[in-house]
Amino acid sequence: MNKILLTILLAGLIQGCATLSSSKREYIQQFGLSTRNLPEYSLKLTDGLSNIRSKRGVYFANTLSTPNLHLNELDNIYNQQKIDEVNSALFQNSFAMLSLYSTMLLKLSSNSYNEDLYNNIKELEYGLENLITINNQLTSSNIPTGFINIAAKISFLSGKYYIGYNQNEEIKRLVTSSDSLITDISNNIIFHLKSDNLNSIIENEHMMLSRNYLTYIQQNKQTSVYSDLDYILLKNNLDKIKALKENLIISVTNLKLAHNIMAVEVSKKNTTLDNINQLKELLISISEINQIVEQIK
């Protein structure tokens, strides 16, 4: 009797073909895989700039004539590092939200049942809600929280039944309800990347790196092979960071458009081949960033 009741209950949960189609699963997985490492790329940009500023400052400190002036300059470098950490907090928070969301997509779109699915999703939901709250506190945004709530349904459906019977509906709900969130996050990132402040910092580092190292050479009369190679490495990193910034603008813009397409496609019974191909092409730019990041030492 209990088996009959369970069968009736589960049958009521089925809405057409409730599992994800292979094409939908493919582009959802591709979106998740393409975007989950974006925080690492953003750290390369912010930490890379801070590192260049610190190192060229140390070269300048070594040109100063008294110990007090030398120590004061080192203290200034340290204080600037702390300011850089604060200034990059919102930027990193935005990328962290994208990463958690992408990880959630990968977990939910899996075609295999994992005993830890409930705990994994619950943890990801909690983390994303906290990041949204922090974002709202740091900006004038009012991104709503509490709209995901998938873990409770996984718990009710006992995990493996979620995969078998309700996966498609929950993926559709998550992607469509999160589209405005992804748009807001992407716009915040693009705004920062295009800001006059970031552009002026990069241009200033180009100028000050050469100026500080020239002063170092003039004061020390001669340089070591190590310091010369370090100067060349810093210049190379600065060029790559500038290229990374431009590529992140393109990639995050494409990510936003790709998610817009995905939100439309998951709601359809049949996928549109042109849209799927466009989505894949948009995500290629994100994978290409890795080539730039690997060149920043």
Image: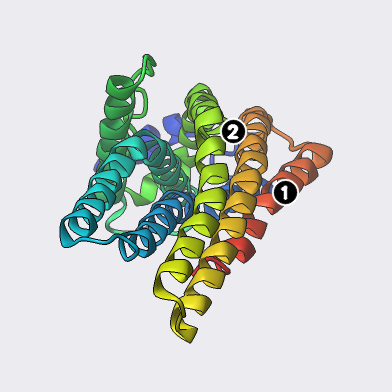
- Residue occupying image coordinates x 45% and y 38%: 166
Relative depth, front residue between 54 and 169: 54
What is the x, y in percent for residue 144?
Answer: 35, 17
What is the x, y in percent for residue 284?
Answer: 70, 53
Report, in whole angstroms, how far the alpha carbon at label 2 lies from the one at label 1: 27 Å
Residue 286 appears left or right of 146:
right
Q: Is residue 239 visible?
A: yes
Residue 226 appears left or right of 131:
right
Q: Which residue is mark 2?
A: 16
* SS at badge 1: helix
- Residue occupying image coordinates x 48% and y 74%: 230
Colour pattern:
rainbow
- Seen as rendered, the residue at the extreme left is 68
What is the x, y in percent for residue 186?
Answer: 54, 31
Q: Which residue is mark 1?
A: 280
Residue flagged by tag 2: what amino acid is it? Gly
Snapshot quadrant of residue 4: top left
